[in-house]
Image: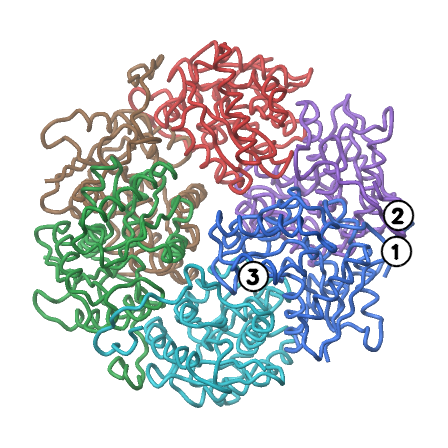
Chain colours: A red, B purple, C brown, D blue, E green, F cyan
Amino acid sequence: MTRIRVINPNTSPGMTETIGRCARTAAAPSTVVTAVNPAMGPESVESHYDEALAVPGLLTEIAAGETAGGAHAADGYVIACFGDPGLDAARELATGPVIGIAQAAMHTAVLLGRSFSVVTTLPRTTGRTWDLARRYGFADACRGVHACDVPVLDLDDPGPGTVRTVTEACTAAVNEDGCDVVVLGCAGMAPLAPTLARRTGAQVVDGVGAAVKLVESLVSLGLRTSKGGEYAAPPSKKYAGLLGEFGL
Amino acid sequence: MTRIRVINPNTSPGMTETIGRCARTAAAPSTVVTAVNPAMGPESVESHYDEALAVPGLLTEIAAGETAGGAHAADGYVIACFGDPGLDAARELATGPVIGIAQAAMHTAVLLGRSFSVVTTLPRTTGRTWDLARRYGFADACRGVHACDVPVLDLDDPGPGTVRTVTEACTAAVNEDGCDVVVLGCAGMAPLAPTLARRTGAQVVDGVGAAVKLVESLVSLGLRTSKGGEYAAPPSKKYAGLLGEFGL
Amino acid sequence: MTRIRVINPNTSPGMTETIGRCARTAAAPSTVVTAVNPAMGPESVESHYDEALAVPGLLTEIAAGETAGGAHAADGYVIACFGDPGLDAARELATGPVIGIAQAAMHTAVLLGRSFSVVTTLPRTTGRTWDLARRYGFADACRGVHACDVPVLDLDDPGPGTVRTVTEACTAAVNEDGCDVVVLGCAGMAPLAPTLARRTGAQVVDGVGAAVKLVESLVSLGLRTSKGGEYAAPPSKKYAGLLGEFGL
Amino acid sequence: MTRIRVINPNTSPGMTETIGRCARTAAAPSTVVTAVNPAMGPESVESHYDEALAVPGLLTEIAAGETAGGAHAADGYVIACFGDPGLDAARELATGPVIGIAQAAMHTAVLLGRSFSVVTTLPRTTGRTWDLARRYGFADACRGVHACDVPVLDLDDPGPGTVRTVTEACTAAVNEDGCDVVVLGCAGMAPLAPTLARRTGAQVVDGVGAAVKLVESLVSLGLRTSKGGEYAAPPSKKYAGLLGEFGL
Amino acid sequence: MTRIRVINPNTSPGMTETIGRCARTAAAPSTVVTAVNPAMGPESVESHYDEALAVPGLLTEIAAGETAGGAHAADGYVIACFGDPGLDAARELATGPVIGIAQAAMHTAVLLGRSFSVVTTLPRTTGRTWDLARRYGFADACRGVHACDVPVLDLDDPGPGTVRTVTEACTAAVNEDGCDVVVLGCAGMAPLAPTLARRTGAQVVDGVGAAVKLVESLVSLGLRTSKGGEYAAPPSKKYAGLLGEFGL
Amino acid sequence: MTRIRVINPNTSPGMTETIGRCARTAAAPSTVVTAVNPAMGPESVESHYDEALAVPGLLTEIAAGETAGGAHAADGYVIACFGDPGLDAARELATGPVIGIAQAAMHTAVLLGRSFSVVTTLPRTTGRTWDLARRYGFADACRGVHACDVPVLDLDDPGPGTVRTVTEACTAAVNEDGCDVVVLGCAGMAPLAPTLARRTGAQVVDGVGAAVKLVESLVSLGLRTSKGGEYAAPPSKKYAGLLGEFGL
């Protein structure tokens, strides 16, 4: 049994539920998925500001996974927001592996062909996406980042207009970039993956499912974040004020 | 049930058996591993020449996987030689995903820390290893490639001297390069992974197990090589002479 | 008159005072430096975890600068921690330019020669330093990152032993890397810059002073963060729980 | 006298003849060109599969060049297929230098201007072309790869329609990419080079001629593949089955 | 008081006057700007040939700055031509810092957003601009180089047609490249910066002003070119013929 | 008959003679080598300053080659100084191809193996060498640059001590860097190439010979610098003062 804590870093329970459902669809029968979101922070992540302020809550959920017992204990974690917020900090805190969904989706995409393009929500997030592609080593493989200008929360129970808009962005990505694979650039798009794959004929990768499989794989292989240096547990120290409870 | 054909591209059945055992150890209970090696080609792969000539036999085994029925049918493939020989060609031929063990090991290593080093067999293979690290996007993450000057076939049922030599190379990699993770640069080293992890205290990644998990993951997610362009089935044409049977 | 808000993102007032003093030494006579630290967060930044949790407090101080009047109003900002925490988010929030001290120090160093090396505090921070060098475009120019294994708070009023340790790390950087310039990798090292320059004979760049000059320059040229896309003000939305006050 | 063995790795004698003619046109009067093709393998190379399976025959021809006497002995080799198949393996086997025509064409193109574009045959080969541009160091110099969707064997004695199609692709490359030089991405295009140069007004580089000149140059300078490490003669070992004759 | 020698490397006094005016506008009240041009060399720099031949005169002006006394002495230098001609040589010769305007403009632009595009004069100069972007580390940040096909000297007292042409090129850069910032690719465009910023709504960076601020900053921080290696004073030796006076 | 003008950009006739001898040794029997040096400029090139001031004289020699008739006419040019001074400007001026010896040596070296190291004269020139390796695309292939601290003119008729010093630097390059090939980083080392190859057992590439072969090859293939854009003839204009004669 592998226990994976899938953390939606925003505070919208509806989106957490959706993400949890997609994670469970991808998970092996023997995997227990606990989908959670923090009690603090933004209701959606649509800016660097939101992303930065989603991290404290995310870290609270990592800490909770470390101390939880039974089925809610965590052998590994998924950060279910395409900016992979707080990934490095989460790795310091967690005993088991931690995977971001942008990381997972890009890693998966390059196994399916020579190139991928990302379809994301707001135009202002494309810079962050390129940043991640570069950091993960996939700057050459990433052919384009296409924003479909849909706010994140519109993806929760999307109407046909929203689905059409995302489909068109995927089609444009394939045709304009000549890419082999489409990567969905928002956890909220996860439920659309099968529809988009069918409509575009392309391989479409959703990071939530991809991340669940990577965590299952690492746990099963007995591998976890290297704790010998950069990702060792953080030095303990005093934290002040509103964030006082974060002191280790 | 996922059926994975693990292909040892050399013609040494002992090594195939070892690789198969390691693949099965990594595989999920519901996965069926078929470990095979071609009937043609070199008994070990220790040069570009060997690697090039291991490919026809490898492709024969891909073709066999495509036409096999029952438990020997293949939902996906592992190429179990660290140079990832014939990966692009195999992808054209196969319906399901194909993963090389260098690719799998490097992909897995970068999920565990910021950097890895590779411990390989003969010094002459280090150039190829750097080539792959660059192609896969991990040139920055790869800190070093350490050859322990052990011939490939000596890794089949290795004596204590060989184990010591490989252990020392792993320790040197960690200490000299300051890397987070050690990647084993030969399928024949797979059985040593637990021992090396214990002795060095580092995360040690064996590509055979890593590749099995990646294929399981892709198959489970319903993903396969994009067939829309570069990796479409090869155009059919006449093949001459000794290789006449390879015509499609 | 240029008004610069220099934000020490940790909660140690002693360090804020030191940083303020160094900033004022570097500033033009007509510049007003307001050195502050947040009321919330870690007393020092020595891990990804600390860095992530220093950001909410930092953003509070950016917001305070935006609404302050008179001499405490801010024409621009300095983030005085070498990891440049929260830089992107701060830029979204601020009207005027925002500069991180790692960014400033590296930008300044490459104007003085072909290469620089960074002398930092704890070994675990070297990965982040390389990350920043890559993001800012200076991966080729950065020849090495040397940790002197001194905790950040030991740099506040350092004894002769600490000064000697840092000096030795600078000398090692120059000799081993053959670099033209030494970059000090911690705001707490700022007061040591003149001493280190004298003892090593090298050009030594402290990011606090460098950042003050860059902000002065941008303000004087009438330039500020481009607000047309990625760095536009964040979309307003609800924030929950402990971080409820961060809603815009 | 320099003796160059120009190997067409496919098994179409018509194309070998054409390549030989172009090679002789480029060669110095004192150079003897032996144009050959293997007796085994694909009649044209239009996929990774074809390319992989062209290599055994190519290596047979390298081996033949090593043992041939008199005018058919080889001081150096040209691999006359734009994917440069088997280049690394051939270098291990050969005493003299070995040059691929993609390598030769790209090396030559960057001596004529800042940038080049490649005009190739089938769209599915563009990925391989970019791969080679990256490996040879010319990723920045290569501005585009344009497929004209002409099967390789149509280039043997091409009709006016084919010539027009290739001309249009060259013109598009120059106009859209603003490149200085056009590189012909198939050995079969070699005879068209003068026509294309005249019609487009651009410098047009054919790899067959370029490779012949590079081999002549290296031989004349007394240089050959470094044999001290990666490209030393392959370790001898047993080869099984259909490829048994390849054992060294 | 900081004394900056701003060197227009061409021999057109009108342009020198314009550049001096822009430099003084950017300079702090306590800065003394001496704007000069050499007595030898081309009247404008529009080719590699012009650029190379502008360097001797430029170096004469550096040497003059080194020996001048009083208000014409130089604490630092600006090379006011967008190709940054002779920058390395000037650094060897000068005691104080030397900044090129392409360098200054690009450094400044990346502090204002994630990306910039350059608007330059003649199409033939775009290659050099990309060269500089790469050398300075900004190849990823530079999204495009747009030539507006205006000869350099037309920018001296430009008519409304010229202003319109440059404005259109700036607008095209913003719209086509999605860049955050426009960099003006010629010293002669400096006076147009405010107009272009107003008309395009973008942040527009003129290198002359940017360079003045960087030199002021470095001088104020007590920093100068590292003299320990590559940029040490040139070895003295005999110079022959027309350039005999350049011997050191 | 190919007529190649080999230009030693310094003003030392002894070195010109040596370079001419080496060029003729490498040249085909039907090639006429004219070895010249300018009448103006530095007696050796050992700094950026020297390099910049060697360019006017170099360009004079290019211009002379363009107008010369008979055997002194130039079908192509070699710039025989390892910094490749004035290469871009020379290409604008020349009708035929122009090759620098660093460019030629690096291009040749990568055809002989996976990597090379450069052995150069003064330590201060290593930065320029890396610059060129990056520009030509060989940053990955270049493993090291070793200065042997020998002044350029000491290489003219070198004593046994100088030869020993250079030999030791070559040996160190091979052993420390594990490179396949040694590139000689100064035209003055050309006569030592055979000795160094014999003593080190490595492939040793001298740029003078390599450049001669490349020019011969390009001329023979009917190729020359692309004149459609960046390298078109420079716009004609007035030149002032000492350099008045350079006006076109």
Q: Which of marks 1 and 3 is in front?
A: 3
Q: Which of B44 and D224 is in front in this view?
A: D224
Question: Do marks 2 and 1 share a subunit?
Answer: no
Q: Are marks 2 and 1 in contact (CB under 8 Å)?
A: no
Question: How far, Cα to Cα, is label 3 from label 2?
Answer: 41 Å
Question: How far, Cα to Cα, is label 1 from label 3?
Answer: 53 Å
Q: Name the residue under label 3.
A: D198
Q: Which chain carries label 3?
A: D
Residue B137 at x, y percent in the picture: 56, 43
Whether residue B96 sits left or right of residue B177 in the image: it is right
Quadrant of the image for the C terminus of chain F?
bottom left
Q: Name the residue under label 2.
A: B244
Quadrant of the image for the N terminus of chain F?
bottom right
| Label 2: few (<14), some (14–19) or many (≥20) C-alpha neighbours in 10 Å | some
Q: Which of marks 2 and 1 is in front?
A: 2
Q: Earlier along the polypeptide chain: callout 1 or callout 3?
A: 3
Secondary structure at numbered mark 1: loop
Whether residue B80 sits left or right of residue E136 in the image: it is right
Task: Name which residue lies at 45% across and 86% down.
Answer: F15
Dividing the picture into quadrants, the one containing residue F183 is bottom right
Please say whether residue B42 is visible from this viewpoint.
yes
Dividing the picture into quadrants, the one containing residue A43 is top left
Residue D54's place in the image compared with A69, above or below, is below
Task: Name which residue lies at 80% across and 52% down.
Answer: B53
